[in-house]
Amino acid sequence: MHVTVYTPASALRDPRLMLRSMFADLRASGELAWSLARRDLKAQYRQSLFGYIWAFIMPLTTTVAWVYLNSSGIVKVTNTGMPYAIYALTGTLLWQMFTEALNSPLAQLNGAKNLLAKLSFPREALILSGMIKWWFNVGIKLLIIIPALFLLGGAPDWHMAFVPLILVAILLIGTAIGLFIAPVGLLYTDVGRMIPVVLQFAMYITPVVFAIPASGFAATLFRINFMTPVIVNGRAWLVGSGGSMHTELALICGAALVLLFLGWVLFRTTMSVLIERMSA
Amino acid sequence: MEQDVLIKVEGVSKKFCRDLKTSLRYGMADVRDEVLGRPRTLDLRPKEFWAVKGIDFEVRRGECLGLIGHNGAGKTTLLKVLNGLIKPDTGRIEIHGQVGALIALGAGFNPILTARENIYINASVLGLSKKLVDERIDEIIAFAEIEEFIDMPVQHFSSGMSVRLGFAVAAILIEPDILFLDEVLAVGDISFTIKCLNRVRELMRTSAVVFVSHNMPLITSFCTRVVVMDHGHSVLDTEEIGVAVNHYFGLAKNSVQISGTGEASVLDLRLAADGGGVKRNTHIQARAGTCRHIARPDRKAKPRKSTWRSPMPP
C-alpha cells in the first residue's frame, strides 16, 4: 500500500524521494492538465456569438495594422534587411508568445487558488494546462502570420521547419522565468503589477520593433539580452533565412532547461508554504 | 487487514499569524528556509498563535474519528494538514493508501459549462480518469437526480442542485482507504441527505474516516471515537461519544436556548439504579448536555429507541 508521510522537514532533504515524486506527479497530471485547459478554452469563448473567432481577432488586427502601414508608406525603416512591416509583425508576435509563456504560471496559480487551498492534486497540472493553452494561442497566431508574410512580400521557405524549435525555446524560457516569479507573486501582488512594466522596458532592448543599434550603450544592452538571439532567429526562420547567433541560442536553451528544472523544484518545495498564506 | 492503522498522527502542530502583512513576511521567510533545507522555526514569532497544537491519534480501517469543537478550534486546519495541503510545523503524519476527500464539493466547476462537462472536470480534479467517469456517468446523474438538466449550464442550477452534483461525482467515483469529510453531509433536501448518509456509511465500512462536523446527531451515529478540540488543543479524546458531545456542549459560552417544543435530542442517556423508579411507558425527556439519573428501572420496562426531534435523521 502506498504510504505518504508529512513532516515539517523540507522536501529537499531527501532529493531522491523528491525526484521520484516529481516525475510521478508529472505523469499523473497529464489528464487533469488537458481537462483544465479544455475547460478554460471552452468557457472563454462559449458565452459569445463569434466563439473561437475571437481567438483570431487580436493577432489579425496586429497583422492588418502592419499591412496597412506598409502599403501606405507611413513607416519606412530600412536598416532591418526586410520590409519593416514583416520585421515588426514577426517581432511583435514572437514577443507576445514570450510574455504569454512568462505570465502563464502565475496566472494559472492565481486562477486556481480556490482549488489549491482545498484539494490535493498534482500541482504540475496547472502549469501544464497553461502550456497547453499557450500552444493553442500560438497555433492561431501562426495560422494568421504565415499567409500574411506572403502578402507583405516575404518569401518563407524550408527554414520554416526550424520554427517549432524556436517556439519550444520561447516556451521553455518563459515558463522557467514564470516559475521563479510565481512563488513570490502568489504572496505579493506587487509582482503581478511589476511584470508588464519590466517587460515593456525589456521589449525596447530586444529587436522586436527596433533594429539592433550598430554601436553605443544600447547596442551592448541588446547584445547581453538573452531574448535577442531567440527573436532574431525566430524571425529569420519565419521569413526564410538562416539567422545568426546560433551558439548563443543553443546556450540559452540549455540554460533555460536547467532553469526550468530548478524552477520546478522551487515550485514544489514552496507550494505548501504558499497555500498556507494564500487567501482563498 | 481490517485492523490496519491507516492514519497515524503524532504531535502535529500548526501555527498561523494574526496579521496579513506579517503573515506574508513570514511566508517569505518560510520559503527561504524551505529552499535552503533549513528546519522551521519552532517558537511562535510575534503575532503568531497555535491553530493546532500537539494532536495525536490513530485511525484504523473501519473506524471513524469525529473532530468536534467550536468555530476556529483548528478542525479544518488539521484536516488540511492531514490532506497534505499544508505542512505541519511539528510532528509527523503517516497516511497509508488512497485518500478520498468529500471537501469542497464541485471543485473546478465552471458555471458556463454544462453539468455533463463539469462532471468530467470535477472528476479529473479529484484524480479520477475519464474512462472511469465514462463507465459510471449514468450512475452519477441518477444519484444527483438531475437527468433532465444534464446538458444545462451549471450557472442555472439552484445551489442545492449544484451541490448535489458535486457530491454525486465525488461519492460515486472515489474508493478511498482514507476518507476526509468536512461538513458536507447536510446537502440538499431531506431525501437527498438520507441518500448521502447511506453512501457515506458504505464508504466508511472499508476506510478510515476523519469526520468534521457540528452536527451532533451525525457525530453520534457515525463516529467510533471523538476528539474534542478547543483553541487548537485536543481537550478530550474518547470512545464514549456521549461524553465527548457533553464536553463539547460544556465548552459553549452561551447557555442552551431551546426553541420549538422544548424537547431536545437525547445524545446520551445512562441509567443508574439508586432509589426511585421508572415504570413501563414512562417517557423520559432530557435536555441536550444534561445528565439524567433514572433510578431502579422496572424490570419489564425495556428502553425503546429514542426519538430525534432534530431536523437531521440520526
Image (cartoon, coloured by chain):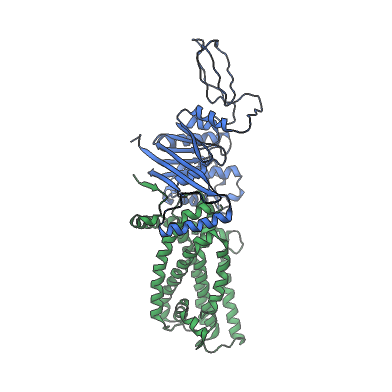
Chain colours: A green, B blue
Question: Residue B2, how many percent across, how many down?
Answer: 35, 34
* A53 displayed left or right of B204: right
Q: Which residue lies furthest to the right in this view?
A: B260
> As drawn, is A113 to the left or to the right of A237?
right
Q: In this view, does A229 lie above or below B210?
A: below
Image quadrant where residue B22 sits? bottom right
Percent x, y for residue B294?
A: 54, 15
Which of B53 and A235 lies nearest the eye of the viewer?
B53
Can the viewer see residue A115?
no
Q: Position of residue B67 (x, y in %)?
A: 50, 37
Identify the residue shown where x is 52% and y is 55%: B26
Q: As displayed, is residue A181 above or below residue B275? A: below
| Residue closer to the observer: B288 or B307 | B288
Is residue A19 visible in the rendered structure shown here?
yes
Residue located at (41% from left, 54% from top): A10
Q: How many marks?
A: 0
**Which quadrant of the view contains residue A173?**
bottom left
Q: Tell me if residue B144 comes above or below residue A158 in the rendering.
A: above
User: Picture quarter containing residue A265?
Assistant: bottom left
Q: Quadrant of the N terminus of chain A?
A: top left
Q: Position of residue B23 (x, y in %)?
A: 55, 54
